[in-house]
Image (tube, helix red, strand yellow):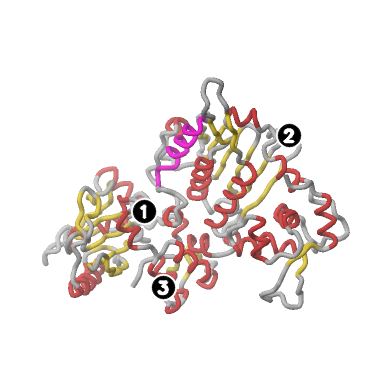
Amino acid sequence: MSLPIAITDILHGHAIEWERLEFKEGWNPLRVLHTLCAFANDFRNLGGGYVVIGVAESKGRPVLPPVGITQEEADRIQKELQNLGHSAIFPSYHPLAAPYVVDDKLVLVLWAPGGRNRAYRAKTSLSKNSTETAWYIRKNSSTVKAAGDDLEELLSLTASVPYDDQENIYAKVGDLSRTLVIEYLREVKSDLAKRTKKLSLEELGRRMGIVSGVPEMPFAINVGLLFFNPEPWRFFKQTQIDVVWFPEGRGGDRFTEKEFKGPLHQMLRDALAYIKKTYLSTTVVKHKDRAEADRVSNFPYEAIEEALVNAVYHRDYNTREPIEVTITGDELTVMSYPGPDRSVKTSDLVKGLATSRRYRNRRIGEFLKELDLTEGRGTGIPKILRAMKKNGSPRPKFRTDEYYSFFATVLPIHRDAKAAAPDLGSTAGQVTGQVTGQVTGQVTGQVTGQVAQVVAHLDGELTRQELQDAVGVASRAHFRTTYLDPALETGLVEMTQPDKPNSRSQRYRLTPAGKKLRAQQPKKK
């Protein structure tokens, strides 16, 4: 059996916070039981954790190479875990066990995701006559008994499952894309990717924790639909990122809006690539007193990336509001809804010192980190502050209201970049802001900004891949559903072989209406 994450990431903490990892040199059933109970309670909604047996620990870090265990020990441990899950933890709870060979040594990895029936209790002793139980939680990298305010708070979470980890009763397992799942497993270098041909989509989903329910009625989990359905907005309205450019400022009459949709990670990457390509610039600042010149960005990409990743991670997908990125000649703002957890003090938030006690989405952050789209929880605001300071930019601003109804990260433009590039984004604004309605009587659909981009980049006859690369979209599914198919439907683009739509030699070209529209667009600089 394999896990949906590479064993190297587990051993080195690359995609998992250290507080979600525990290493055991040998098999200690009672201590492992208590740690599994703590991971099942998932007190901070971090997504549970992993216990690695056969690896010693020093100051919370693994000691490599591993000590290892024998095959007989691995088999015996798995049998004991099955019994403990029924008789020593309440309600019943069973982790996923997967053996791995590391440096010629066998280790056993236990994946313990956050449980759906918390709060969980475990026996304090495994002696035959013991009946005493206690609640366990994680505090930093340690497992402790929950007591006092922590226990009261844990009990208040009874049967409370974060929205991203809930079953979606309106979706079937078949709504998950096997192709997207396999692409993800390959990208994170999971050993599970090698076994996909032998597993049904349901079996694959259960091992990844994106399918749940009884065998006769399985359901897709919300986080699975968000990452592995090509059109997640069908299940979660307004799951999109809107990038809006105001060339005259927020009070002006003109603006350009571009929407990004698709699986969360692809939507995020596409939006970041577009912002980087269209709105980011570098200014060379020369000095009279020294030969070396400084190079500054109008907005540091690292700060934008972290702000947008945080918005994708922390927004409420039960709220029908998109993530908004608004850009003016003075600042770039990333807005998401609702605001931070109420455990965050507004005064700390404004100062950039806020840390959340509990996370809204325990699984989304896990997937984003495995895809190297974020470093980990609690690092967002500090990373933004560092990136702005390193670039010499003004200090960013973090905003919400007394009702915690929104969260905004405001990145002021670098003063030298503002003086050097007052026409920020003007080319993109002309392309997407002037196309709608210019070609009349010859267009059968809506000329969106994405369609305009296809028209602007379609020179001669191009393959689907060539056109996708020209537009600059990473996801094939997103490009086809949001760019290419709408362009074909408008009558602005046509196939060179319309009677063979799936031909390997298929090309795409502009129709007469498409050529007319392209002639009306300002030439790309």
- Dot 1 corresponds to which residue? 14
103 relative to 301, above or below: below
For marks 3 and 2, give the CA distance.
54 Å
Amino acid type assigned to the residue bearing label 1 in the image: His
Q: Is residue 254 above or below residue 26?
A: above
Q: Is residue 373 visible?
A: yes
Q: Which residue is mark 3?
A: 194
Q: Is label 2 in a helix, a strand or a loop?
A: loop
Amino acid under label 3?
Answer: Lys
Q: CA distance from mark 3 to mark 1?
A: 21 Å
Is residue 3 found inside the magenta-colored segment of the image? Answer: no
Give residue 30's position: percent from left, percent from top: 17, 61
**Residue 405 shows in this picture:** no
Camera-near label (1 vs 2) is 1
Q: CA distance from mark 1 to mark 2?
A: 45 Å
* Nearest to N terminus: mark 3 or mark 1: 1
Q: Residues within 10 Å of mark 2 (few under 14, many from 20)?
A: few
Question: Which corner quadrant of the image does residue 489 belong to?
Answer: bottom right
- Residue interval drawn in magenta: 377-392
Reading the image, the residue beneath label 2 is 252
Assign the C terminus to one quadrant of the image. top right
**Residue that appears at 65% across and 35% down:** 328
Report how many numbered discs are placed on residues in the image: 3
Residue 323: % across, % down: 58, 47
